[in-house]
Image (cartoon, grey):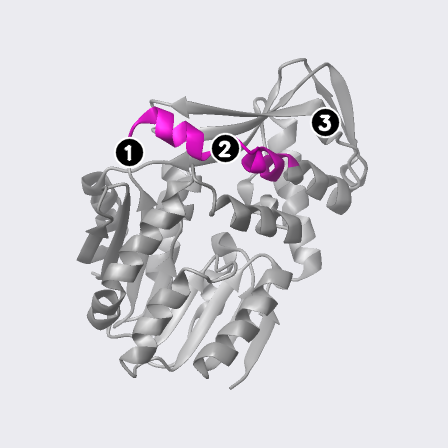
Amino acid sequence: MTSAVEVVASAEERELAMRDDVRAGLSARPRSVPPVWFYDETGSRLFDEITRLPEYYLTRAERAILAERSAEIAALSGASTLVEIGSGTSEKTRILLDAMASSGRLRSVVLLDISEEVLCEAAAELSRRYGVEVQAVVGDLRTDLPALSGRGEGERLWAFLGSTIGNFEPKARADVFAGFRRALQPGDTFLLGADLVKDVGRLLAAYDDARGVTAEFNLNVLRVLNSALGADFRPEGFAHRVSWNSEGRWVEMRLRSKAEQTVRIASLGLDLDFADGEDILTEISAKFDPAKLAAELADAGFAPAGSWTDPDGDFLLTLSRPA
């Protein structure tokens, strides 16, 4: 079978979106950059490395659930197409695809990711491995879910894994859930991965590993801005910082200026004066209570179909249907 890659968010459109995000986020106080811009080819590779670190329990916990429950999830969904959002390398999802293929139901795969290079590789590999049509779409989940409408064969299982939903504050998270609810058709199901609240020390360690891979991943966003927007950030002039926001119940990842400095973003005509110790918020990672997450999904128009945790109770997968 074949794989096809369609760019619904062109390079020009992605650059325009980046310009808007960066101008708004870095002109404001406190400053911020959305985490979507971590994922150039280097950022995707570094994140893949993060998922293998001893401190980063999230991927192991989610994989453990999939390894034990994928056949049950596939059967409950009744789906013949998997739609994966923010697919990356699709490594974990192959466990779910194996279960769908073993049941004889798997007919097609649809992928959405912002990184064209990683998406092309994943699509070709899945097409070879499963012998089904793979449609890969380069786009942003915040705006491009409608582009997936009608893709794939039969009923679809939409998978949004890795606790990426935690990168959104409550209002933005509600918008994301509403976007999924509009995109799902009757008979479709929605599989969501979410990290659960736990000991703060473990949470912080997961985003500040001893080898410094997460720090390099965080700093790489400055290199992305330098390359894409003609900025002159000096990554060595910033430090990786992690903290726990007890009110929001999320981990915050920041880049802290090590000294007073001025950064020029040429393509935006911006000169940014940073104070010594001033931060750029680059990511939040919200942690969830199962009951509250179920309430958020219900508010968005979803009905529960199943939920599973790993043996240690660190991570949650939920399966929902349009209500």
**In whole angstroms, how far apart are the C-alphas of marks 3 and 2?**
18 Å
Residue 280 image-quadrant placement: top right
Give the mark, 3 or 2, whose residue is nearer the N terminus.
2
Q: Which residue is mark 1?
A: 197
Relative to residue 127, is residue 8 drawn left or right? right
Which secondary structure dominates the residues rendered in magenta?
Answer: helix
Can residue 155 be seen here? The reply is no
Give, as a three-letter code, the residue at label 1: Val
Q: Which residue is mark 2?
A: 209
Residue at (23%, 42%) from the top-left corner?
Answer: 312
**Neighbour class for label 2 at 10 Å: few (<14), some, many (≥20)?**
some
Give the mark, 1 or 3, whose residue is nearer the N terminus.
1
Give, as a three-letter code, the residue at label 3: Glu
Residue at (71%, 14%) from the top-left corner?
Answer: 259
Front: mark 3 or 2: 2
**Neighbour class for label 1 at 10 Å: few (<14), some, many (≥20)?**
some
Relative to residue 259, is residue 298 drawn left or right? left
In the picture, the disc for residue 236 is 3
The residue segment tinted magenta is 198-219
Relative to residue 288, is residue 145 drawn left or right? right
Residue at (45%, 23%) from the top-left corner?
Answer: 243
Residue 211 image-quadrant placement: top right
Can residue 174 be seen here? The reply is yes
**Neighbour class for label 3 at 10 Å: few (<14), some, many (≥20)?**
few
Residue at (43%, 74%) from the top-left corner?
Answer: 109
**In whole angstroms, how far apart are the C-alphas of marks 2 and 1?**
19 Å
Could you say whether the residue bearing mark 2 is in a helix, strand or loop?
loop
Asked if the residues shown at circle 3 and circle 2 are in contact, with their CB atoms under 8 angstroms apart, the answer is no
Give, as a three-letter code, the residue at label 2: Asp
